[in-house]
């Protein structure tokens, strides 16, 4: 029995089954119309994916999330690495990060909408901001931890600052950077849903609120399941990539709950 429980996929599966069981018992006990059973919710999922409008909303959300995350990856990782290796860059950027960090990213959405309208550009930009902070933080920490002897060796070989950043600093900081990527993609998902709830044109956040307005509670819970599934797939994918790219690192563990 203990050996069976030690198999990699068994504990998460048991936890999921326990959660579904508790959900079913609670929904059956209370019997509220707005609290459907898991069976009712999962019956809604095939019809949901069969609807062209719902599928288009989900696809639009994933597209925005990936676009905002890719932009954050391109900007925040090099900037974080530069902060870790240049005290001047760190002094310039840290006050800005300290100002933005505690502000809920959804609270920036009305201002960004004034600048960029209510289309995809505003949502992608706010996703970019939300995903950039963990990427910046982890890239900065990874660059700080790079062995100075490697930098001196690269300088002795004639590598300039930019080449040192990508040929020496980035590979050395990669384990920490990949943890930041894993946290960042989940932050991108959270901010994506929040932004779509505010600027309700399309996406899973829009579909979620519209379903709640029309008292389609099975669809509301089904959309929450879809959002959770997107987050789970993204997290598993980045953990797979992280382990493959940083197999040489001694530590392969992450925080249970991502920190922004």
Image: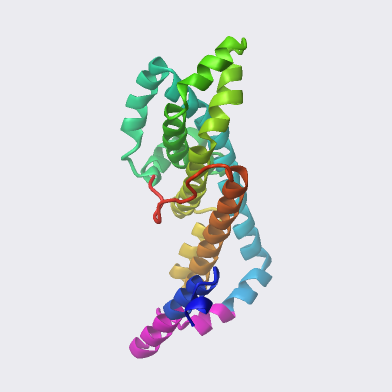
Q: Is residue 97 above or below residue 1?
A: above
In the rendered structure, the answer to whether residue 184 lies left or right of residue 233 reads left
Say which of 78 and 216 sits in front.
78
Q: Residue at x 61, y 64 (%)?
A: 54
Q: Which residues are magenta?
A: 20-43
Q: Is residue 243 above or below residue 144?
A: below
Say which of 15 and 116 sits in front.
15
Q: Residue at x 62, y 49 (%)?
A: 63
User: Is the C terminus in the top left, top right, bottom left or bottom right quadrant?
Assistant: top left
Estimate the x, y position of residue 184 in percent, counting from the top left. 48, 45
Estimate the x, y position of residue 194 in percent, counting from the top left. 44, 52
Q: Residue at x 39, y 43 (%)?
A: 105
In the rendered structure, the answer to whether residue 255 lies left or right of residue 225 reads left
> Is residue 32 among what the camera can see?
no
Q: Is residue 31 above or below residue 95?
A: below
Q: Is residue 28 magenta?
A: yes
- The colour mode here is rainbow
> Is residue 197 among what the camera can see?
yes
Say which of 177 and 118 sits in front.
177
Q: Is residue 93 magenta?
A: no
Q: Specify the principal SS of the magenta part.
A: helix
In the rendered structure, the answer to whether residue 197 lies left or right of residue 8 reads left
Quarter holding residue 47: bottom right
Estimate the x, y position of residue 159 in percent, counting from the top left. 61, 13
Estimate the x, y position of residue 109 in percent, counting from the top left. 42, 42
């Amino acid at each position: 029995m203990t050996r069976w429980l030690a198999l990699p996929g068994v504990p998460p599966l048991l936890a999921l089954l326990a959660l579904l069981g508790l959900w079913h018992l609670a929904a059956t006990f209370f019997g509220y119309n707005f609290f459907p059973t898991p069976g009712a919710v999962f019956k809604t999922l095939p019809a949901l994916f069969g609807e062209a409008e719902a599928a288009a909303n989900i696809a639009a959300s994933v597209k925005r999330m990936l676009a905002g995350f890719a932009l954050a990856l391109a900007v925040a990782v090099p900037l974080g690495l530069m902060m870790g290796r240049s005290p001047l860059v760190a002094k310039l950027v840290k006050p800005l990060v300290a100002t933005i960090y505690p502000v809920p990213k959804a609270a920036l959405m009305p201002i960004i909408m004034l600048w960029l309208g209510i289309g995809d550009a505003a949502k992608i930009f706010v996703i970019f901001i939300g995903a950039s902070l963990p990427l910046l933080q982890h890239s900065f920490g990874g660059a700080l931890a790079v062995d100075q002897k490697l930098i001196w060796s690269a300088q002795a070989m004639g590598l300039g600052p930019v080449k040192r950043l990508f040929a020496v600093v980035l590979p050395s900081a990669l384990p920490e950077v990949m943890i930041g990527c894993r946290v960042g993609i989940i932050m991108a998902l959270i901010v994506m849903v929040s932004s779509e709830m505010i600027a309700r044109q399309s996406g899973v956040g829009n579909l979620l609120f519209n379903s709640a307005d029309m008292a389609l509670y099975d669809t509301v819970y089904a959309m929450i399941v879809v959002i959770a599934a997107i987050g789970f797939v993204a997290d598993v994918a980045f953990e797979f990539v992280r382990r493959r790219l940083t197999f040489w690192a001694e530590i392969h563990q992450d925080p249970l709950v991502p920190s922004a």
